[in-house]
Amino acid sequence: MNLSLPFIKRPPLVAILPLNGMIGSGGRFGSGGLNDAALEPLIEKAFSKGKPAAVALAINSPGGSPVQSSLIAARIRRLSEEKEVPVFAFVEDLAASGGYWLASAADEIYVDRASIVGSIGVIYAGFGFNSLMKRYGIERRVHTAGKDKSLLDPFRPEREEDVERLKRLQAKVHDGFIAQVKARRGDKLDTAADLFSGDVWVGEEAVALGLADGLGHLVPRMKERFGPKTRFTTHGRRRSFFARLGMRAMEDAAGLVEERALWAQYGL
């Protein structure tokens, strides 16, 4: 019989929340990505189950959707404040773009010497097929209600007004990203450096610029903070039966290609 004695104080508990992969909505989660709806129960458990002394985010992400990044980070902050539980982020290979947005939800950010951090910017990438269609005599037929409904159609020549419109949208999203980082990192940031150009930095560079608080790995850093007997529990995702068999839908395969392209930007 397992008898629990209520007057015996247990060692502190740190809840680990892995945040690995591309950030996107809907089916993209199935290909290893992250979205707020699917992470909600895991985040809730991380802050509630076992009365944790802290939540540690183990981040390895090339970014993705700015909206999902914002939703996930906001949920983490909201629960941290409600439960009065501090949050620590530990960057593994990469916390770029939306991945750094997630890291900024933490009270403190730690990196490895070789971790890549930053990419605080907004990107759009696509293809143009209009020349290929012309070569093979393919006619494109599009009918819209609203002259701006067809934005950056890849099957027609790029229009200057479409590019200007896209850049206006990107600027607004970029402003929100910058505001998030400034609000969370505050006076820690090196104001003389151009931190919001979309550039990335490695390990100690990120620390020197104020994008991270120091070098350190999750378990030893948490034991240093909460004691050598600190306990750990991980709130990770469970793959479906079909995913464990390697059986994925076509949309998941497309998501994997997209995610692979994101990682490749950073040589990973």
Image (cartoon, rainbow, N blue to C red):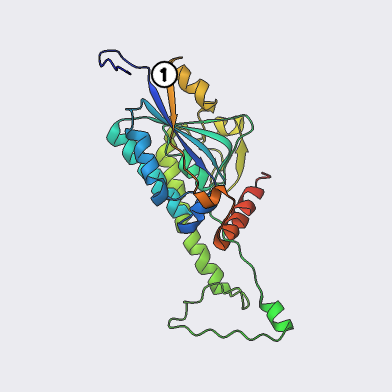
Per the image, the residue denoted by label 1 is: 226
Q: Residue at x 64, y 32 (%)?
A: 114
Residue that lies at the very extreme toward the front in this rendered image: 1
**157 relative position to 39: left or right:** right
User: Is any part of residue 64 visible from this angle?
Assistant: no
Q: Residue at x 59, y 60 (%)?
A: 254
Determine which quarter of the picture holds residue 253: bottom right
In this rendering, is residue 245 above or below 13?
Answer: below
* Position of residue 65 measured from the top left corner of the image (x, y, whole percent): 49, 54
Q: Percent x, y for residue 174?
A: 48, 53
Q: Residue furthest left?
A: 7
Q: Quadrant of residue 226?
A: top left
Q: Residue at x 59, y 51 (%)?
A: 246
Above/below status of 20 relative to 258: above
User: In the depicted view, which residue is nearer to us: 122 or 48?
Assistant: 48
Q: Position of residue 102 (x, y in %)?
A: 46, 42
Q: Nearer the viewer, residue 204 or 28?
A: 28
